[in-house]
Amino acid sequence: MDLFSDRSYKAPLADRVRPRSLEHYIGQKHILFEGSPLSRSIERKRLPSLIFWGPPGVGKTTLARIISHSVEKPFRQLSAIQAGVKDVREVLTFAKSRPGTILFIDEIHRFNKSQQDSLLGAVETGLVVLIGATTENPSFEMNSALLSRCQIYRLEPLTEQEVKELMIYAIEVDEVLSNYQIELRELGALYKLSGGDARKSLNLLEMYVDTFEDPIVLEDESMIKIAQERVPLYDKKGEQHYDIISALIKSIRGGDPNGAIYWLARMLEGGEDVKFIARRLIISASEDIGNANPNALLLANACFDSVTKIGMPEARIVLAQTAVYLATSEKSNAAYLAINKALKYVRDHPDYAVPMHLRNASTKLMSENRYRYIHSHSFMDKEENKSFLPDELSGMSFYRPKGIGSERKIVRFMLDKWDEEYELDPE
C-alpha cells in the first residue's frame, strides 16, 4: 500500500513529528543549553514574557508549546494576522481565573499600537505570560513599552548537522516514514534547498519519499531534480517571499543592478504584488541612499504611484527602471543610523529638560526670565549659534553625513555653521 496516498494521513510530516518536549527539540542550543537563563526559567516554572525572533521554520511555535507544557500553564494561541483587540480581551478574561496563562501570538509585529497596548497591563501584572513570535526585528516593529517587559531571544536556522538529526528523528518516530527503509546517503542538497528551515527540510524529505519506491536512498542529484520539478520557484506567501525581497534590497544596497534585476524578475515571474515591491523600493531609497541622492526617494514614490495606476505587465518596466537607478546611485545610510541612534539614546537616558532659549515664552514674565528665543533668521554669524540640544547633550552627534553625493553639501553646511560643535565623518 502507498501510505502517502492513504487519506488518513493528511497532516504534513512537520506536524506529525512536532516534538512535545525539550528532549526531542532540535536546534537553538545557544539559548537552551544547560544553565542558560531560559532553561533555568523553564526548570523553575517561573517564566518571563518572551519574544522569539527568527526566520520562518526555526521552531518558534513549537518551542512556545513545549515551554507551556513544561511549566504546566494553560496555553492560548492567536495569530496577529487574524486576531484583533476583541480576541485579546477574550484571552485576558479567560486568564482572570487562570493567572499565568501563556498567550502565544504568532507574527506579533503585525499587531498595531492599540493591539499591543491592550496587552501591557496583563503582561505587567503577570495575568498572562506573553510569548511573541516574529520574523522582523522587534526593536523596529514593536512598541518599546511592551518590548521592555519581555526578554528577546534570537532563533537561528538549523545547522547542517541539526538538519541531519531532524531527518533521523523523523524517520524513526513518524508512523508513515518508519514503514520505509530510508538511507540518508547525501544531505547537502536538502540542506541548501531548505536553508536550515526545519519545516522546509521535512517537506522536502516527505516529497522525496513520496516519489520513490521502497527502499529509498536519499542522494543530492535526485533531490535537486525533484525540487526543480515539484517545488515552486517562488511562493509569495511563504519563506521565499522574504528571502528574495531581501536579496533584491541587498543587491541595490551593494550597487549591483544585474543582481537587482534578476531578483526583481524572480518576484515578478512568481506573481508577487507589484505594490509590495514598490513599497520596499521606497524604504531602500530612504534607508540606503538617503541624502546622498534625495531624488531617489522621489523616484521611488513616483514608481509606487505608477505601478498602482498601470499594473502588470507594464509595471515591470517602471520597477526595473527604479531598481537600476537605486542600485547605481550613490548611497548613504546616515539618516537611518541617526534616527536609530537617537531612539536608542532616548530609551536609555532620562528626558532632559528643554533649554530655556528653546521654550515657548507665552507670557511677558516668562520672556523676561530667560525664556527668550532669538529667531534664527535674526542672525547669520556662527558666533551667535547656540546648540538646539539639551545642555547635557552639547556636542552629541546623531547625524553624521558621509560626504557622499549630495551629502557633500550637508558636510560643508555643518562645518560652516557649526564649526567643530559636531563630529563629522571625513570626506
Image (spheres, grey):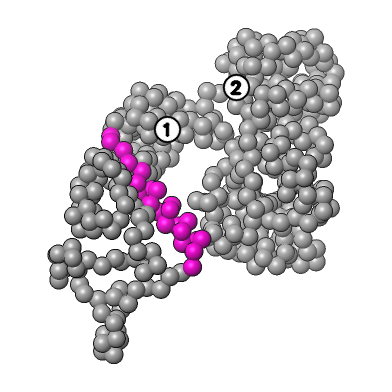
Instruction: Characterize the magenta stretch by its predominant secondary structure.
Output: helix
Q: As drawn, which residue projects farthest toward the front?
A: 420
For this rendering, which residue is in front, 49 or 307? 49
As measured in the structure, the alpha-carbon distance from the residue carrying label 2 to the one carrying label 1 is: 20 Å
Residue 217 visible to the viewer: yes
Tell me if residue 56 comes above or below residue 340 in the rendering: above
For this rendering, which residue is in front, 161 or 275? 161
Question: Residue under circle 2?
Answer: 193
Residue at 64 percent across and 16 percent down: it is 188
Amino acid beneath label 2? Leu
Residue at 41 percent across and 73 percent down: it is 353
Q: Which residues are magenta?
A: 329-350
Mark closest to the chain's N terminus, 2 or 1: 2
Tell me if residue 359 comes above or below residue 342 in the rendering: below
| Circle 1 crowding by C-alpha within 10 Å: few under 14, some 14–19, many from 20 | some
Residue at 35 percent across and 26 percent down: it is 256
Q: Is residue 339 magenta?
A: yes
Pair 2/1: label in front: 1
Marks 2 & 1, CB-CB < 8 Å contact: no
Question: Residue under circle 1?
Answer: 250
Residue 298 visible to the viewer: no
Relative image position of residue 136 (x, y in whole percent): 54, 44
The answer to whether 319 appears left or right of 97 in the picture is left
Relative image position of residue 157 (x, y in whole percent): 63, 32
Q: Quadrant of the C terminus?
A: top left
